[in-house]
Amino acid sequence: SSAAPLWTGESAGGTSGERPSVRVDRHGNGLLEIVLARGGQLNALDASMWGVIITVATAARDEASVRAVMLRSDDAKAFSAGGDVRALAQTNSWRERVAFLHLEYAALAALSRLARAKPVVALSDGVTMGAGLGLFLTANRRVVT
C-alpha cells in the first residue's frame, strides 16, 4: 500500500535538507508506522524525536482512520540505545536537562495513552536499552528478534 505522511515538518528531526530522525508513514489499511531513523546514532532519542512522538501519538489516538500503530526502527543494529546522553551533557543548565527529561516522560505518557486506545506493536531488533526500552515497553504488543 502507498504510504502518506500523517505529520511532517522540520521538527521531525534533523535540519532542513537532512533526513528526519523519525519517519511517520500512514497506510491505507489503517496502520500508522512510527519509524526511528537515526541509525548513525543507534536511534539515540533527542528532543526533536521526543517531540515528534508526542505529536504523532496524540494525533493518532484521536484519529478514527488510524486503527493500529507500529513502532519500529530502520536500523538493523538497534531499536534505540536510549536517550541522547551527548545532547543532555551539552545542555547549559539543570533547567535544560529537566526540560529534556520532561519531553521524554511526556512522550512515554502519550504513547501509553495511545496504547490504551488502540493496538500498538513495537518491534525490537538489536540494541534496546534505557529510554529506548521505556519507549518499547509502552506498546501493548511487543516483538523481539
Image (tube, helix red, strand yellow):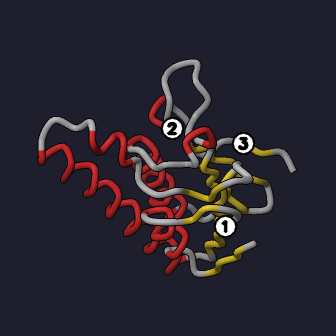
Quarter holding the C terminus? bottom right
The first of marks 1 and 2 along the sequence is 2
The residue located at (71%, 64%) in the rendering is: 125
The residue located at (77%, 45%) in the rendering is: 3
State yes or no: discs 3 and 2 in contact (Cβ < 8 Å).
Answer: no
Alpha carbon separation for disc pair 1 and 2: 21 Å
Residue 70: x and y in percent read 67, 64
Taking the image as shown, residue 57 lies to the left or right of residue 100, namely right
| Residue 12 numbered tag | 2
**Mark 1 = which residue?**
124
Q: Is residue 18 above or below residue 11?
A: above
Alpha carbon separation for disc pair 1 and 3: 24 Å
The residue located at (35%, 58%) in the rendering is: 104
Mark 2 falls on what kind of element? helix
Q: Is residue 136 above or below residue 58?
A: below
Q: What is the three-letter code of the residue carrying label 2?
A: Ala
Quadrant of the rendered structure where residue 119 is? Answer: bottom right
| Crowd band around label 3 with a 10 angstrom C-alpha radius: few (<14), some (14–19), many (20+) | few
Comparing 96 with 111, the one in front is 96
Taking the image as shown, residue 101 lies to the left or right of residue 40, namely left
Q: What is the three-letter code of the residue carrying label 1?
A: Ser
**Mark 3 = which residue?**
4
Q: Is residue 14 above or below residue 100?
A: above
The first of marks 3 and 2 along the sequence is 3
The residue located at (50%, 66%) in the rendering is: 129
